[in-house]
Image (tube, rainbow, N blue to C red):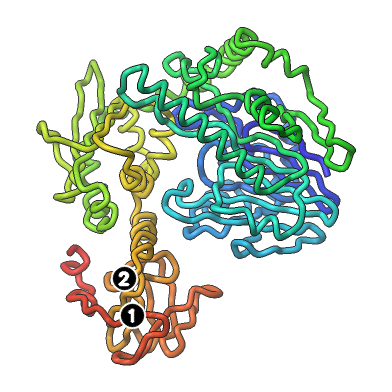
């Protein structure tokens, strides 16, 4: 069992039962803001791309790099696919050319020609881009857990499978807070220090809980090569920086009495089946980590080589032909109409200021109370975002349905807010499609015990209100024909006589003839629109 570091969250796992490539990322991500650190662009990716299996944990662009996957990873690889609520990851990987997939049920161990794997999928609206995951694997002698960005509430499911030999876990920040907030420097520094301490402590708690033999800090930090973002690099001796590097965290682990930490650089090889898990590095780590000056020099050289990629991309971001207000209004209006829980959670306005010194600013208000988009007119708002007009135009041109996984993670914006952090704001901006929004709305509904047990009546049948597949509201999307209920959101079907799902294994529907008890559900709550599926009722 050998683990080769490939940069950020990517590793190449060689086992007695096959090889696994995880989360390969090379190209700049999030409007050209993030780069892997240290640089991994000069690795022999064609060789690593010949792995037997590919695991992409989620759709964040520092884990899913479609350009790289298309060019360097063999399409003969079998994809180990998390069981996410939507098919977006599978669809994206198929677009890259992959055709062989294994999708185990979340938490189930599956044997693949001697390689046992278990993928735990996290599927709340706040987990990654509607989904994050961790991969456990064993070749019969050694066990590895690649948790990367995933944050399970507990690790019991992995511990029960036996002692873990190698544990890969995120330790560094992967967010825009607090850097982008318009706050006094001292307040921002205090928030950054708290954030850094919490992320170190969280990782340490996971390490203590799992008790793995060896720990590899991975999935960060990124580096920032654009001059306007340069200050986010941890090269200034600032303990409030949320992007500390690997050696900083390894020193922290040692200060807490842990000596099991191991450094993985791009190209480093850790041998789990050797005494003490020796790591062979492709170069002396001191050439980068000896001092802040050495690290700065390394980043400047990397900047010279790689920034032309970003400059070329920037040239295509502006789209003067796009009417931002008109396009956002048309796009968001139907989403706002359906965003009952999200709109209620925000309960106010969000202002977006799109700045351009030459062409003029565009100032829009997304009103979650009135459920509309309009020009901003001096209203008081809960959140305000400022960014360049070209960035919004690019999001519209690409119809990017996840602004968290693009604009926000780019850190190319500033923010103000009144009151505490509101997760509903960012959930909305990562759910800019009907599919994602309906899943998020259904998930929030199921957190409410009363709503989770709510039933509706459709054409003489009482049934659960939320679709077992992706939580769509069946009072809006359900139709019945010849004893079969179809959810029009994705076309999934259920046989009403026993609730069996006809489109997939599991996902059965709780239902009964009208007036009879519905198994596991509360009393029927009459919905004035539940028996109607015309455009007027859907709009309401």
Residue under numbered circle 1: 522
- Residue shown at the point (66%, 31%) measured from the top left: 256
* Disc 2 secondary structure class: helix
Can residue 528 be seen here? The reply is yes
Characterize the local packing of mark 1: few (<14), some (14-19) or many (20 or more) Cα atoms within 10 angstroms: some
Residue 422 is tagged as none
Please report whichever mark, 2 or 1, sits nearer to the chain's N-terminal start.
2
Quadrant in which residue 540 is drawn: bottom left
Q: Nearer the viewer, residue 421 or 133?
A: 421
Q: Position of residue 428 (x, y in %)?
A: 32, 47
Q: Nearer the viewer, residue 207 or 347?
A: 207
Q: Position of residue 275 (x, y in %)?
A: 89, 38
Q: Quadrant of the N terminus?
A: top right
Q: Are marks 2 and 1 in contact (CB under 8 Å)?
A: yes
Q: Residue furthest right?
A: 275
Cα separation, mark 2 vs mark 1, equals 8 Å
Residue under numbered circle 2: 450
Instruction: Say left or right for 389 vs 56.
Output: left
Instruction: Say left or right for 141 vs 471.
Output: right
Characterize the local packing of mark 2: few (<14), some (14-19) or many (20 or more) Cα atoms within 10 angstroms: few
Q: Position of residue 41 (x, y in %)?
A: 65, 26
Q: Position of residue 110 (x, y in %)?
A: 71, 64
Q: Is residue 327 above or below residue 77?
A: above
């Amino acid at each position: 069992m050998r683990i080769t570091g490939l940069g950020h969250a990517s590793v190449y796992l060689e086992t007695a039962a096959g090889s696994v490539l995880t989360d390969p990322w090379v190209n700049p991500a999030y409007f050209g803001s993030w780069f892997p650190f240290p640089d991994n662009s000069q690795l022999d990716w064609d060789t690593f791309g010949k792995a037997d299996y590919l695991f992409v944990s989620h759709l964040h662009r520092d884990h899913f790099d479609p350009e790289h996957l298309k060019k360097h990873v063999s399409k003969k690889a079998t994809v180990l696919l998390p069981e996410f609520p939507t098919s977006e990851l599978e669809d994206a990987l198929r677009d890259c050319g992959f055709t062989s997939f294994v999708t185990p049920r979340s938490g189930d161990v599956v044997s693949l020609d001697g390689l046992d794997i278990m993928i735990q999928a996290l599927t709340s609206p706040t987990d990654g881009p509607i989904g994050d995951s961790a991969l456990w694997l064993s070749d019969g002698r050694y066990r590895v857990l690649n948790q990367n960005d995933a944050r399970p509430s507990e690790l019991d499911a992995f511990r029960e499978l036996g002692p873990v030999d190698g544990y890969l876990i995120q330790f560094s920040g992967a967010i825009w807070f607090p850097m982008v907030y318009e706050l006094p420097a001292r307040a921002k520094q205090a928030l950054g220090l708290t954030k850094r301490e919490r992320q170190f402590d969280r990782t340490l708690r996971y390490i203590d809980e799992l008790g793995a033999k060896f720990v590899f800090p991975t999935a960060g930090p990124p580096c920032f090569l654009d001059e306007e973002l340069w200050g986010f690099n941890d090269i200034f001796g600032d303990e409030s920086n949320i992007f500390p590097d690997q050696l900083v965290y390894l020193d922290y682990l040692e200060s807490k009495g842990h000596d099991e930490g191991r450094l993985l650089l791009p190209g480093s090889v850790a041998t789990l089946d050797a005494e003490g898990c020796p790591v062979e590095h492709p170069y002396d780590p001191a050439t980068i980590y000896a001092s802040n000056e050495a690290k700065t020099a390394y980043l400047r050289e990397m900047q010279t080589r790689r920034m032309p990629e970003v400059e070329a991309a920037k040239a295509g971001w502006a789209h003067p032909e796009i009417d931002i207000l008109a396009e956002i209004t048309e796009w968001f209006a139907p989403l706002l109409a359906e965003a009952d829980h999200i709109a209620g959670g925000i309960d106010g306005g969000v202002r977006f200021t799109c700045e351009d010194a030459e062409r003029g600013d565009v100032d829009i208000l997304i009103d979650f109370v009135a459920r509309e988009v309009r020009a901003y007119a001096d209203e008081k708002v809960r959140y305000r975002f400022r960014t360049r007009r070209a960035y919004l135009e690019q999001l519209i041109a690409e119809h990017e349905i996840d602004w968290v996984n693009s604009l926000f993670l780019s850190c190319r914006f500033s923010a103000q807010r009144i009151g505490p952090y509101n997760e509903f704001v960012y959930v909305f901006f990562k759910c800019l499609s009907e599919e994602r929004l309906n899943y998020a709305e259904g998930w929030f509904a199921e957190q409410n015990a009363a709503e989770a047990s709510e039933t509706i009546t459709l054409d003489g049948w009482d049934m659960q209100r939320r679709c077992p597949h992706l939580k769509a509201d069946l009072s809006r999307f359900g139709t019945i024909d010849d004893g079969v209920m179809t959810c029009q959101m994705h076309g999934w079907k259920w046989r009403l006589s026993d609730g069996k799902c006809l489109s997939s294994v599991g996902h059965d529907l709780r239902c009964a003839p009208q007036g009879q008890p519905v198994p596991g559900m509360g009393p029927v709550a009459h919905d004035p629109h539940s028996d109607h599926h015309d455009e007027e009722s859907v709009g309401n």
